[in-house]
Amino acid sequence: MNKKNEPIKEGRKLRSIQELAELLGCTTASATTYMKEGKIPYYKVGRTVIFDVNEVMEAIKQPVKA
């Protein structure tokens, strides 16, 4: 659950690595690694990183390329 104890809904925008990690069920370090490796799509607005839940969910459905 996020800070407001609400489930993360499709179509929602995540505005932190912590929210992304919560969605993925991993640590913030792993979420950061996935982002930097290009496995998770994101947008930067100034210093803020934004993740679209729909895009993240679609990206994690894709098979891993060896």
Image (spheres, rainbow, N blue to C red):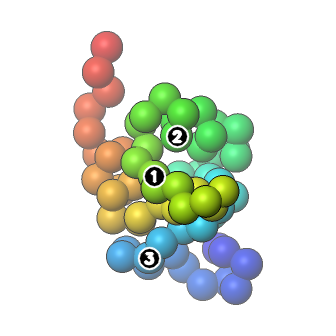
Q: Earlier in the sequence, mark 1 or mark 2?
A: 2
- What amino acid type should be assigned to the residue bearing mark 1? Tyr
In terms of depth relative to the viewer, which is nearer, 49 or 14? 49
In which quadrant is the N terminus drawn? bottom right
| Secondary structure under the numbered disc 1 in the rendered image | loop
Most extreme residue toward the top is 66
From the top left corner, tell me how far across and down residue 44 is, in percent.
52, 55
Q: Gap between marks 1 and 3, in whole Å? A: 13 Å
Tell me the tag on residue 35: 2
Q: Gap between marks 1 and 2, in whole Å? A: 7 Å
Between circles 1 and 3, the one closer to the viewer is 1
Q: Earlier in the sequence, mark 1 or mark 3?
A: 3
- What amino acid type should be assigned to the residue bearing mark 2? Met
Q: Are marks 1 and 3 in contact (CB under 8 Å)?
A: no
Would residue 34 be visible to someone looking at this image? yes
Residue topped by disc 3: 12
Horizontal side, residue 17 vs residue 12: left or right? right
From the top left corner, tell me how far across and down residue 50 is, in percent.
52, 62
Residue topped by disc 1: 42
Question: Looking at the image, is 52 positioned above or below residue 4?
Answer: above
- What amino acid type should be assigned to the residue bearing mark 3? Arg
Q: Residue at x 39, y 54 (%)?
A: 56
Q: Are marks 1 and 2 in contact (CB under 8 Å)?
A: yes
From the top left corner, tell me how far across and down residue 6 is, in percent.
60, 84
